[in-house]
Image (cartoon, helix red, strand yellow):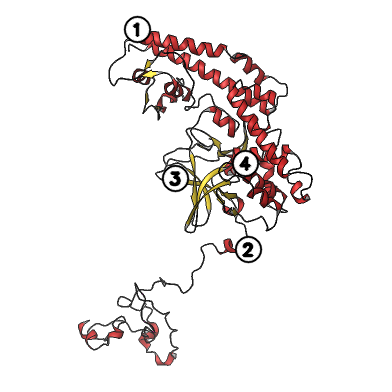
Amino acid sequence: MATVAGAASPLLLLLPSPLPRHPLAFPPRRAAASRRVLLQPPRAGRPRLRDRPPTPVVEEDELGADEEDDVTPPLRLLEPPQEDDPFPPEMEPADPDFYRIGYARMMRAYGIEFLEGPDGMAVYASRDVEPLRRARVIMEIPLELMLTITQKPPWMFFPDIIPLGHPIFDVIESTDPETDWDLRLACLLLYAFDIEDNFWQLYGDFLPSVDECTSLLLAPKEDLMELEDQDLATKMLKNQQRTIDFWQKHWHKTIPLKLKRLAPDHVRFLWALSIVQSRSVNLKLRMGAFIQDANVLAPYADMLNHSPDANCFLHWRFKDRMLEVMIKAGHAIKKGDEMTIDYMSGVNSSFMERYGFSSPTNPWELLNFSSDAKIHLDSFLSVFNIAGLHDELYHNSALTLGENTFVDGGVVAAARTLPTWSDGDVPAIPSVERKSAQALQEECQTMLESFSTTIQQDQDILDSDGHIRRTREIAIKYRLHRKLLLQKIIDALDIYQDRILF
């Protein structure tokens, strides 16, 4: 190489000169190799090379007899590597169809199916999924299919389906930016139902009707009294009146027909508001260089039910504006398992107010005790193999894998809600602990007796064959779940007294 490079100009250092035939006897080439020349200075980084020029045509009679029989490929050890241009002259979009006007991408699902469950449409696994170190995508919902509105003005809609001058925009503009996010999204949902050939006109078949909806916004006053929770009933009556006042203010007799047909009566608007509250999510959406807080109605993802031990979560992929539903890392999924997400950490009354459901094993449920009796927190946690700080309690899930399924979210809620005291590793005095546990049991029994019905009577109402309104059914379940939690605490205190000396 020293003898070859010594006579070459600096411009040709990037390309080899023809090699001598001796002393290295390489097979001759079919055609003379052409040199690559840089027509312009290289950019930052690696040099940019032009495409190889076409091979010149050589007559067959010019080739020697040895060259005609030679099929050995030319030697390329000393030629520059062939590589793609790292600086393309034009930037091509990753998904060109996404930028077409009126184009809508499709939703994609992997290894799941949508089936009718005990509480409506739900998402179930259609195959086994082994636990992985990384999260796995099971659903992709593009931005074009979602209804999205930013939480603060100036309002930004995705997709931008509201034309200029439409009266629904004036209705949205009149809302309070701090408190009326649900009213704005409900207006957007009603308008989407009115657009011809809009996706939400078809997806509306998957949404519950007025009679099927469990939201307490649609519950009459007698159903709210079935809750036997005065604070929750009063709050829902105020929410209903707020919605009706908003509808009466903007849907009066003199409004245009294109606005009146969106919500001809207040029940229609109450239904739209209940859909928004129970099925929307709050996301931080990154659009280019901006991060915006938005309220989103994501189709198909809204079928995911809540679980405090969820196996999935939501992720916003800003590169191509896609909402992903992903299986958590390390979770094993069996065929037929329900796919769930964690809505929030809250008490049952909060779930009832927004979503219209409650759970007897909600680990975040709280009860108000008035007794001065307290049990030792560390001793109670050790009896039921519960660990963690007082605000972040969890239990060993291995206990529920065997025949004993007593330890669940209800016991964790008991550890969180019972009046306790803790003094490090100082053991509790058994006689004092039993006396405190019995006092707490008596207060729980008093709470149970304050209800107008018993656990068995509520269960009989729910199991009866007669028709029952969905809102009345969910109200009875709410009070039943509170009773079951009280009974769970009474039983847990019995076990605690038996094992206090172990």
Residues under labels 1 and 3: Cα distance?
Answer: 50 Å
Write the residue at 67% across / 51% down.
170
Q: Residue 350 — which label?
A: none
The mark that comes first in sequence, 3 or 2, is 2
Q: Is residue 326 left or right of residue 268?
A: left
Which image quarter: residue 458?
top right
Residues under labels 3 and 2: Cα distance?
Answer: 33 Å
**Residue 248, percent across and down?**
72, 40
Q: Amino acid at mark 3?
A: Ala
The mark that comes first in sequence, 1 or 3, is 3
Dot 3, crowdedness within 10 Å: few (<14), some or many (≥20)? some
Q: Amino acid at mark 2?
A: Ile
Residues under labels 1 and 4: Cα distance?
Answer: 53 Å
Residue that numbered label 1 is attached to: 431
Residue 64 in the image: above or below residue 440: below
Single out the residue that lies furthest toward the left: 2
Residue that numbered label 2 is attached to: 101
The mark that comes first in sequence, 3 or 4, is 3
The mark that comes first in sequence, 2 or 4, is 2
**Helix, strand or loop at mark 2:** loop
Dot 4, crowdedness within 10 Å: few (<14), some or many (≥20)? many
Residue that numbered label 4 is attached to: 276
Residue 213 in the image: above or below residue 46: above
Closest to the camera, between mark 3 and mark 4, is: 4
**Residue 417, percent across and down?**
44, 22
Q: Amino acid at mark 1?
A: Ser
The mark that comes first in sequence, 2 or 1, is 2
Residue 429 in the image: above or below residue 292: above
Q: How many marks?
A: 4
Residue that numbered label 3 is attached to: 135
Residues under labels 2 and 4: Cα distance?
Answer: 28 Å
Q: Amino acid at mark 4?
A: Val
